Image (cartoon, rainbow, N blue to C red):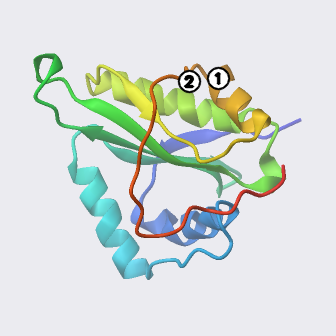
Amino acid sequence: MDKLLVIRPALPSDLPQLLLLYRHLDPLDESPSLDFAAQRLAELQALRGSAVLIGLTENSVVVSCTLVAIPNLTRAGRPYGLVENVVTDAAFRGRGYGKLILQAAVAAAWQADCYRIMLMTGSKKPSTLAFYASAGFEQSKTGFQIRRLPPRAETAD
């Protein structure tokens, strides 16, 4: 039986584990120093409605996502949410933790009065796309981007 998952906003003391969890996104991605990561976390937390959410089991960070509530001048000034860096430790996948962290992000976005939540993935894997759809996200619109860093390499499930 799985242990209880506790979801909450990340604290500076969570950063060492969080940065290790991000290795599951891209093992070759360069991590920031802890001081710089703490500065970035504080900047995110200063944006009303924004948070790096983490899921812990037995005091270990096993799942995370970032929600940014972006101020807006349309839709009566209501912000919109952007979800990024959705990651579950490979050893804990398939337990529903990813859906739980996304549900928490959606609830936080609605609490912040966001009128919509956007999420982009570079993955073309049917399993990844099905995961986001099963979490309530609809594949719509067409995304465009200009990059300074190359996209993450797609890894096998």
User: Which image quadrant is residue 32 in?
Assistant: bottom left
For residue 28, above or below residue 85: below
User: Which image quadrant is residue 37 in?
Assistant: bottom left
Check disc 1: other Cα within 10 Å, few if <14, some if 14-19, many if 20+: few
Q: Mark 2 or mark 1, which is nearer the start of the sequence? A: 1
- The quarter of the rendered structure image containing the N terminus is top right
Q: Is residue 108 left or right of residue 30?
A: left
Residue 56: x %, y % from top left: 63, 49
Q: Residue at x 72, y 57 (%)?
A: 154
User: Are the residues tagged 1 and 2 within 8 Å (C-beta)?
Assistant: yes
Pointer 2 residue:
139
Q: Relative to the observer, which residue lies in front, 117 or 146?
A: 146
Q: Residue at x 42, y 62 (%)?
A: 147
Residue 20: x %, y % from top left: 63, 70
Q: Residue at x 32, y 23 (%)?
A: 111
Mark 2: amino acid: Gln
Q: How many marks?
A: 2
Pointer 1 residue:
133
Q: Relative to the observer, which residue lies in front, 93 or 125?
A: 125
For residue 29, above or below residue 156: below
Q: Relative to the observer, which residue lies in front, 29 or 107?
A: 29
Mark 1: amino acid: Ala
Badge nearest the viewer, 1 or 2? 2
User: Which image quadrant is residue 18 in?
Assistant: bottom right
How far separated are the C-alphas under marks 1 and 2?
Answer: 7 Å
Q: Is residue 66 left or right of residue 138?
A: left
Residue occupying the far right of the picture = 1
Q: Secondary structure at mark 2?
A: loop
Residue 114: x %, y % from top left: 29, 24
